[in-house]
Image (cartoon, rainbow, N blue to C red):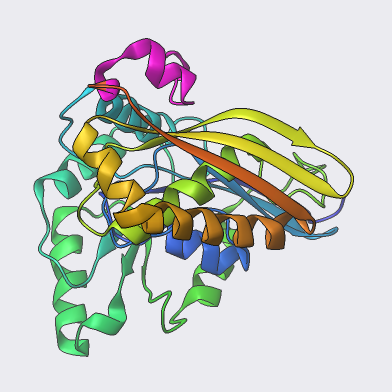
């Protein structure tokens, strides 16, 4: 296939720098869930951008690298660092509106060890004046001269998103064939997508009350031609968190269920029956067996 380009692009950065938002913007599809909370992404998620006979870009959205406080955090960090191995290009995302921190420096040091092309992507440019953006570029260039390019972006204002895509394509190798069928936009199974949609609506509905001590387990999934039947458990660590999710007279869990069901029906294009149950599993984030059962497998990393 003449001049066809295909390759893997890892998107890395500390928590809440806009990795998932950027991926969704580039893709034009919702691939990763997005909230204002740090560490929303827990798994490496592939978004596959296709143009037939021209290119296939496989983006890998990763958890934000942070100081681990439990076994789940360690799995998330290992997942993110593994993503920079055996890829064709790394996008290192840093925010324009925050100081350079220890997690940024840790990731930069890890990237410096890898013989892979790196693009520095400065995000959230809409939050900063132009002179401050220039200062941020100079500050980062003083820390490393190994970036193939520096791109200032804003997913909210659509600043330089197409330019970034053009630079990515320029850096990718030519290939004889795509890695995935053209109709594929993600490699994640339906169970994963359903879990993430429910978890996103919990995070959006509960504010700061339920940070990251919640996980979703799909107990039963029956996918018929015209209807999708789902039974899911919401796992929390404390009884007080169970009460927060259920809400007064069950109003909060009803709203979470309604919004999750509505979004899933739009995604799958069919009727969805959704049952949800809230269960307490104390200290689940330090339970290797439950972490694996919930889809966060340390053995992969």
Instruction: Provide residue 289's location: percent of width, then percent of height.
Output: 39, 11
Asked if 33 appears above or below 78 in the picture, the reply is below
Residue name at image x 43 percent, y 82 percent? 159
Residue 159 visible in rendering: yes
Taking the view exactly as shown, the residue that stands out farthest to the bottom is: 130
Of 134 and 190, the residue lying toward us: 190
- All told, the count of numbered labels is 0
Which residue is located at x 20 percent, y 83 percent? 128
Left or right: 56, with 106 as reference point: right
Residue span colored magenta: 284-301
Quarter of the image containing the C terminus?
A: top left
Vertical arrangement, residue 158 with respect to residue 287, above or below: below
Left or right of 129? Residue 179 is right
Q: Nearer the viewer, residue 292 or 135?
A: 292
Residue 116 appears left or right of 172: left
Q: Is residue 5 magenta?
A: no
Residue 71 visible in the shown view: no
Q: Work out which residue is located at the far front of the displayed protein and give it.
A: 249
Measuring from the top left, give residue 250's x and y in whole percent.
39, 52
- Residue 289 in magenta? yes
- The quadrant in which residue 192 appears is top right
Say which quarter of the image contains residue 81.
top left
Q: Position of residue 177 (x, y in %)?
A: 82, 42
Q: Horizontal placement of 134 versus 204: left or right?
A: left
List x then y, in percent, for residue 183: 82, 52
Q: Which residue is depicted at the point 33% across and 25% down?
A: 75
Name the dominant secondary structure of the magenta segment.
helix
């Amino acid at each position: 296939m003449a001049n066809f380009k295909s390759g893997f692009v890892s998107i890395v950065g500390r928590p809440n720098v806009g990795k998932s938002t950027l991926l969704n913007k580039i893709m034009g599809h919702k691939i990763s869930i997005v909230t204002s909370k740090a560490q929303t992404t827990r798994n490496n998620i592939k978004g596959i951008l296709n143009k037939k006979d021209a290119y296939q870009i496989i983006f890998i959205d990763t958890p934000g690298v942070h100081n681990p406080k439990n076994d789940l955090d360690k799995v998330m960090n290992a997942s993110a660092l593994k993503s920079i191995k055996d890829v064709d290009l790394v996008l290192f995302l840093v925010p324009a509106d925050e100081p350079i921190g220890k997690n940024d420096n840790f990731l930069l040091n890890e990237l410096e060890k890898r013989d892979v092309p790196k693009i520095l992507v400065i995000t959230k440019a809409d939050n900063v004046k132009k002179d401050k953006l220039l200062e941020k570029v100079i500050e980062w260039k003083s820390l490393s001269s190994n970036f193939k390019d520096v791109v200032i972006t804003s997913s909210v204002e659509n600043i330089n998103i197409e330019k970034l895509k053009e630079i990515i394509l320029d850096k990718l190798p030519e290939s004889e064939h795509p890695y995935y069928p053209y109709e594929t936009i993600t490699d994640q199974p339906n169970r994963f997508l359903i879990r993430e949609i429910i978890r996103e609506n919990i995070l959006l509905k509960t504010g700061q009350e339920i940070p990251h001590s919640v996980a979703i387990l799909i107990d039963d999934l029956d996918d018929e031609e015209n209807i999708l039947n789902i039974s899911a458990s919401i796992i929390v660590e404390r009884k007080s968190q169970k009460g927060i999710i259920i809400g007064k007279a069950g109003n909060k869990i009803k709203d979470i269920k309604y919004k999750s069901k509505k979004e899933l029906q739009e995604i799958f294009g069919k009727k969805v029956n959704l049952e949800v149950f809230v269960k307490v599993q104390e200290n689940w984030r330090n339970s290797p067996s439950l972490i694996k059962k919930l889809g966060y497998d340390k053995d992969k990393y």
